[in-house]
Amino acid sequence: MIKYLLIIPILLITTLTFADEFVINTIVDEVKDGDTYKVLYLKLPLTIRALGIDTLETRKIKRAYTQADKYNISIDEVIYLGQIAKNTIEYYLSPTASACIELDDENLTDTYGRHLGIVYPTSCEYRDKEQTIQEIIIRNGLGEVDWRIEETEFSKHLLELQDNAKKNKLGIWSKL
């Protein structure tokens, strides 16, 4: 078992290194919450963290209480909005559906070992015609742009969507 766990990262890095871009076609296995998903790539399991966004928690853990204070909402509202974010993404990323992931070529993983990327709810050949999961979350006020994201055209676009959600008091911005 340990031998296979050591081979998986090497296989992934080797496959990605020879690709033109860090773009992979995957099959959705599970939506963990609004910004974390389990997918299969070459039949190997990967955990993907949607790059540049942060959604509310779906359980009453310490971080959920911090979010309640930050957004001036109750802990139950945090959990409720976190679950709405998860349910919304499950609509787009249903199990066995295709998902295209543009992996972050600067930071392949976060501190929890999750692969960071821009997530499209389609196969890679159609990604230019689809909105990203990040756009869906931010546009509807179901999460916020992560302050650690590098400044790019994509992050600027997400910030514009977030400003619009704030202006319209959507989701997490409803009481601010």
Image (cartoon, grey):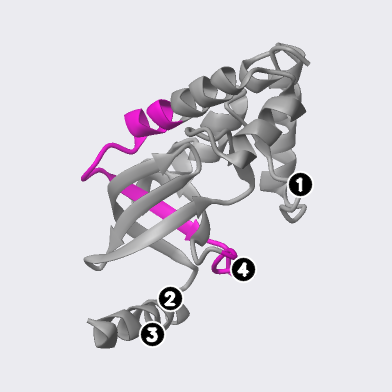
The alpha-carbon separation of the residues under discs 1 and 2 comes to 27 Å
Q: Is residue 111 left or right of residue 119?
A: right
Tell me the element at label 1: loop
- Asked if residue 89 lies in the magenta stretch, the reply is yes
Label 1: how many Cα within 10 Å (few below 14, some 14–19, many 20+): few
Quadrant assignment for the N terminus: bottom left
The amino acid type found where label 2 is placed reads Leu
- Asked if residue 40 lies in the magenta stretch, the reply is no
Tell me the element at label 3: helix
Nearer the N terminus, badge 1 or badge 2? 2
In the image, residue 88 sits, relative to residue 94, either above or below, namely above
The range drawn in magenta is 86-111
Q: Position of residue 90 (x, y in %)?
A: 34, 33
The alpha-carbon separation of the residues under discs 3 and 1 comes to 31 Å
Q: Nearer the viewer, residue 158 or 173?
A: 173
Callouts 2 and 4 close, C-beta under 8 Å: no
In the image, residue 113 sits, relative to residue 1, either above or below, namely above
Nearer the N terminus, badge 3 or badge 2? 3
Q: Position of residue 137 (x, y in %)?
A: 55, 31
The amino acid type found where label 3 is placed reads Ile
Q: Which mark is residue 147?
A: 1
Total labels drawn: 4
Q: Position of residue 61 (x, y in %)?
A: 55, 39
Quadrant assignment for the C terminus: top right
The amino acid type found where label 1 is placed reads Trp
Q: Nearer the viewer, residue 79 or 170?
A: 79
Name the residue carrying label 3: 10
Question: Residue drawn 49% across and 58% down?
Answer: 102
